[in-house]
Amino acid sequence: MKTFINVFILTVIVSPVFSQEHTADNQYACKADEIAFDGNDLVSYQGEQVLKGKEEHTYEYEGLTLRFASWTNMDKFVENPKKYLPAYGGWCAIAVANGTLTKPDFSHFQIQDNKLYFFEVRAFFNGQTAWNRDPDINKIVADKKYEQLTQP
């Protein structure tokens, strides 16, 4: 019952906080003409410190322009992109659970079950805090919603 109440509260109270910034035809939370994920090295999120990618380590993947801090990190990504790509195309995870595609702050993240999740933070709302109230249920809901949100 507690879990149902948490999901209900998130749906009713938090949903209006989110804004749908992109359309469902955009699988990723990055526009085609920008450096993806604010230029952060996706591989470095798995380590101790998030690093900015360098222009000389640029890689194009599924319409994304990615940058990496080193050739080593770029090679790791090329070898296994699914390991390093963020959940829900990089959209705010809690927003996805609430049925919207909202661009997150790429400095607010966590690794859950070896997967990278990003969160929106603005004014009085911290998406990561909301997600962590019940991460397992939020993941189940977000998985289903993301599939619906990204269908053509």
Image (tube, rainbow, N blue to C red):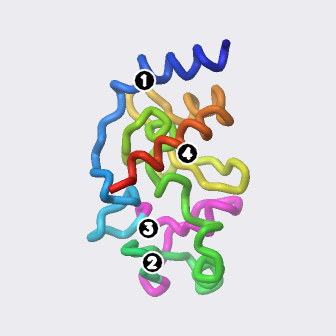
Q: Nearer the viewer, residue 24 or 45?
A: 24
- Residue 39 is marked as 3
Q: Secondary structure at mark 3?
A: helix
- Residue 61 is marked as 2
Question: Mark 4 is on which residue type?
Answer: Asp
State the extent of the magenta-drawn residues as a range.
37-57
The residue beneath circle 4 is 143
Measure how far apart labels 1 and 3 are at the Cα level: 29 Å
Instruction: Tell which circle, 4 or 2, labels the residue nearer the N-terminal end.
Output: 2
Residue 137 is situated, as x and y percent measured from the top left of the image, at: 64, 32
- Residue 14 is marked as 1
User: How many C-alpha atoms fall within 10 Å of the one at disc 4: few (<14), some, or many (≥20)?
Assistant: some
Locate residue 135 relative to residue 101 in the image: left or right.
Answer: right
Question: Mark 1 is on which residue type?
Answer: Val
As displayed, is residue 129 above or below residue 21?
Answer: above
Say how many tags the image has.
Answer: 4
Q: Nearer the viewer, residue 116 or 137?
A: 137
